[in-house]
Image (tube, coloured by chain):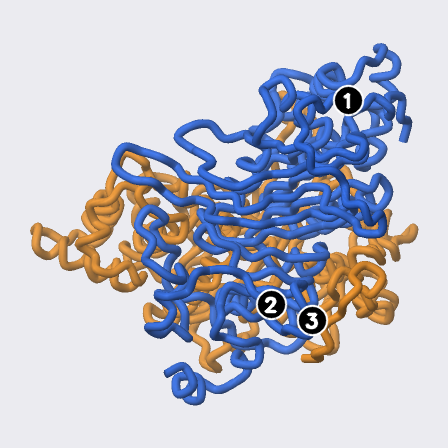
Amino acid sequence: MTDQIATKTGTVGDVVLEAVNISRDYYLGRGRSGPVLSAVREVSLSLYRRGVVAIVGESGSGKSTVARMLAGQETLTSGEVRLDGNVVHVKHRKAFRAYKREVQMVFQDPFASLNSVHTVRHHLMRPIKIHRGIQGRQAIEEEMSRLLNLVSMTPPELFLPKYPHELSGGQRQRVAIARAIAASPRVLLADEPISMLDVSIRLDILRLLSDLRETLELAMLYITHDIASARYVADEILVMYAGEIVERGPAEEVTQKPAHPYTQLLVSSAPNPDALGSSLRTGTKVVPGQAGSALSSIVGCRFSPRCPFADEQCRSTRPPIVPTNDGRLVACWHLDQAASSSVTIAPKSRATRTKKVAEKPE
Amino acid sequence: MAEPAMNDVPKTTRATAQARAKDSTEVLPVFDIQGLSIVYRSDAKDTKAVTNVDLALMPGEIVGLVGESGSGKSTLAYGACRLLRPPAIITSGSVTYRGRRIQGEAMSVLEQSRSELREIRWREIAIVFQSAMNALNPVLKVQDQLFDVMDAHLSLSRAEKQDRAESLLDLVGIARDRLKSYPFELSGGMRQRIMIAMALAVDPEVVIMDEPTTALDVVVQREILAQIVELKDRMGFSVLFITHDLSLLLEVANRIVVMYAGHIVEVGTAEQIHHTPAHPYTRGLLNSFPSLHGPRRELAGIPGTPPDLSQLPPGCPFMPRCTFASDRCREVDMRLSPVDSSVGAVHTTACPFVKPEDHETPVSVRTRSSK
């Protein structure tokens, strides 16, 4: 699991941040007598210098909880987080602050993550003062300009006095990213950084994150529900379902040849412009249903209620995550079956719906 | 679906004399926006949110309206239903509604009185609003909100309403016992489905969907889209689908209307937009989303930011961001003209210079030809 992965650029750094079998339980009833929700169960992952790891999953799959645990904002029920090989304890304020200097987060909603009564200047000045200890007006101003240049908000003098409401969604997210890198961290945890943005803006932000990963040598965790964007930024993809990792491997392999039935569902659900309507009609094989339940009372595979291949074994025994022969890890009892009927979206003519079909194959 | 009050025809007292075409084979659009312009007026300036827009929705059709935030797509839809209040002002244009329940007559939406508007809103033209959390009343049960819609437009007994509410939930794939739930007890996908059920509660002819799946997961999004397509086929309404995600529209829409800075820049079928985009902005949108299927391709995106609508330069508003821009673009009047005269007005673009094949040519050739 700690084998090094090849990054898109071919080079890979050392492990910076590591999670070893981390779990998080929530007690739903009063006290500890009620049902237990294991929001995250035994997740292990490693973030490398200059590497991007993506966690993909639906709402409630526990992907944000993993990020919060890595950021030291959520206590672990079991397992440990290691920074440079040392187990992280963020029990008291000073340790938490020191940890934050190394590990920063970018949040989903740039409308909520910036304080609307403060200017861009304020948002950038605080981390510079707190984490970097830079003194003197001139030095701080220079550092703020450098940060805004890094996130392509130029000229900086124009943006420093602005309030969040005067900025567009994309600009706000850039400020949030600038704030995160102001502490000059080594790890950046990006929790759905583009899902609230316009499609045309998303690409810019993704590109910015990729550039920063290179120039600042960041280790990055990219959390998303859009597996297509993970394909473009990440080196390794982890697919989470109901708190567990069901599949992990190099980005291209996972997205092009999904092995786990849930990954197949995710891939087939992504909009596919080339199919032009057909797949919406044919429907997916998987039973549509509620999001996966992470209640600890479920003994078998948590995806089994929605899985087309589920049988008695799936419902009674939890599948271990095992390596396949093409170098990834999958947790499924019926890999052969799933692989053989791997979801294919058959291009079907849409001539019944529209009269004129442009004759131009691409 | 149970249809207890299908025959009650809303009164159209002041309908314009524009009767249906004599030629019965010609199908007229059910919702027809002509030359609509909307501005947000303040003392200092007018912000031109929508400028001279034509948009026709044929019966049973899904038309996709795509554009960035602030391109005027929501203003266009709400303005056409007269849901905007000052400072938004409709400065010109007409909106014609021709529903099946309005026999042989067309209704000019912009000329109706308030009480007449109340008759057609929701009954004829319903809207699925953008954020289901804010659009549902948090202190009323799902059932009461559905009943409210029916009370406003139909006269049904309590039992009939109950029946209808239950069959509506069946339609959108939610268990019947959820009628007694409050919105906060439902997941995001379920709330969005409730919004769709509410829009369909009194069997409208036109459903406007304003970013109905934006906040949802891809899996849920796909389920809801499939449901919309299926319901449309079954109940025969027309859909105006507003989104910023062109990749979605390519799958779900029959025709796609691309909007930029208040102007429509290109109209075409999904195939035409996908394979032979004419306008550089459409091309930029197509290059903006990462694709999961097929080989990894280099994504270009669209450089720059959308313009300030209160200070639009003369000519094409996309000029500052366009790779094809030259001085002649300042003269462009943004009128739509056919891309290929042999195909006709099915595929139109506001850019008179750039042709679909130009997007294939290398940059060096491009700059030479644009002199």
Identify the residue under disc 2. B338
Q: Quadrant of residue A276?
A: bottom right
Q: Is residue B77 above or below residue B199?
A: below
- Mark on residue B326? none
Give the alpha-carbon distance from disc 3 to disc 2, as whole Å. Answer: 8 Å
Sequence-wise, the earlier of marks 2 and 1 is 1
| Rendered location of residue A239, percent (x, y) | 65, 58
The answer to whether marks 3 and 2 mark residues whose Cβ atoms lie closer than 8 Å is yes
Q: At 70% from the left edge and 62% from the top edge, which residue is drawn?
A: A267
Q: Is residue B84 above or below residue B113?
A: below
Give the alpha-carbon distance from disc 3 to disc 1, as whole Å. Answer: 50 Å
Chain of the residue under the numbered disc 3 shown in the image: B
Q: Colour of chain B?
A: blue
**Residue in front for this viewpoint, A97 or A273:** A273
Q: Amino acid at mark 1?
A: Leu
User: Looking at the figure, which quarter contains the C terminus of chain A?
Assistant: bottom right
Chain of the residue under the numbered disc 1 shown in the image: B
Say yes or no: labels 3 and 2 on the same chain.
Answer: yes
Q: Quadrant of residue B271?
A: bottom right
Identify the residue under disc 3. B343
Sequence-wise, the earlier of marks 3 and 2 is 2
Judged left or right of residue A275, residue A40 is left
Q: At 69% from the left edge and 62% from the top edge, which residue is drawn?
A: B269
Q: At 76% from the left edge and 37% from the top edge, which residue is drawn?
A: A297
Chain of the residue under the numbered disc 2 shown in the image: B
Q: Amino acid at mark 2?
A: Pro
Q: Is residue A338 above or below residue B215?
A: below
Letter of the chain in orange:
A
Judged left or right of residue A151, residue A67 is right
Identify the residue under disc 1. B179
| Rendered location of residue B263, percent (x, y) | 48, 53
Q: Is residue B122 above or below residue B325?
A: above
